Amino acid sequence: MERQEPHAVPRDIKVSQDIVLSPFGCAFHSEAGALLLADLHIGYEATIEGEGFAMPRMQTIEMISRLNRAIDCYDPSVVIVVGDLKHNFDRNLAAEWNGVERFVDEVSSKVKLSILKGNHDNYLATILSKRGIRIEKEISLGGISVAHGHETRSARSGGMILAHEHPALRIRESTGASVKMPCFLYDSENGRLVLPAFSPLALGSDVISTPDSERMIPLLAETGIDRFTAYGFSGKEILNYRKVGKLRTMGKV
């Protein structure tokens, strides 16, 4: 069958020779042909329901739809989930099991799927083994170390792609109202990229107001994130908000 040309991708941004940040909330490593996303937290709604709150179970459908659009645009050879595919720590909820199987079946029918283990992914191997997919702790893409980040404590030579942090920007309006927008963090000096949460329900903490000592990635708690540029996205375009240190000095976005 004749291979189709990849769709054009408007309004993404290339931050290095090989890495493109996408308004779909994922990154594309062009040399490796790898589409990277993280922190899907499938089953989050079921956990909330268990705490007595009603929430429509729509996020897995939305994430599959958005990922399919990214696959159509970038034509990757592999999709890499950089940890926290599922949500519940201590067991596999039925909704998680069904959601993960649906996600895995949908994606792997189109492209090779690779899964890295996050701190929420206890018992995930039980689900993936039925699909013949191994879960890895860390991989390398052209000299770039890729891991979830919850155990990343010391810097190493070469670039890094991490997740876990759920970085976001709180956008404040003149009226005093605010909205939280997920963002990428990229340190061009050291070649370090932090992916946003792909889940629409897990926006995380504001990178400007949250003290660096409270960063979830141990390495970032040690080094801080002032030198990182925050790239917000709206689903249609990438928005460059300057370096975090500059934004903190300004006091607002």
Image (tube, grey):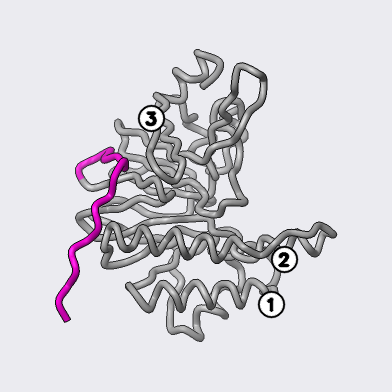
Mark-to-mark CA distance, 3 and 1: 40 Å
Q: Identify residue for label 2.
A: 46
Q: Identify residue for label 1.
A: 94
CB atoms of marks 2 and 1 within 8 Å: yes
Q: Position of residue 219 (x, y in %)?
A: 48, 40
Q: Nearer the viewer, residue 222 or 24?
A: 24
Q: Position of residue 146 (x, y in %)?
A: 38, 54
Disc 1 crowd, CA 10 A, few/some/many (<14, 14-19, 20+): few
Q: Amino acid at mark 3?
A: Asn
Height in image: 3 above or below 178?
below
Height in image: 110 above or below 46?
below
157 displayed left or right of 5: right
Mark-to-mark CA distance, 3 and 2: 35 Å
Report helix, strand or loop for mark 1.
helix
Based on the picture, tell me whether residue 5 belongs to the magenta stretch. Answer: yes
Q: Identify residue for label 3.
A: 240
Query: What secondary structure predominates along the stretch shown in magenta?
Result: loop
Q: Amino acid at mark 1?
A: Ala
10 displayed left or right of 90: left
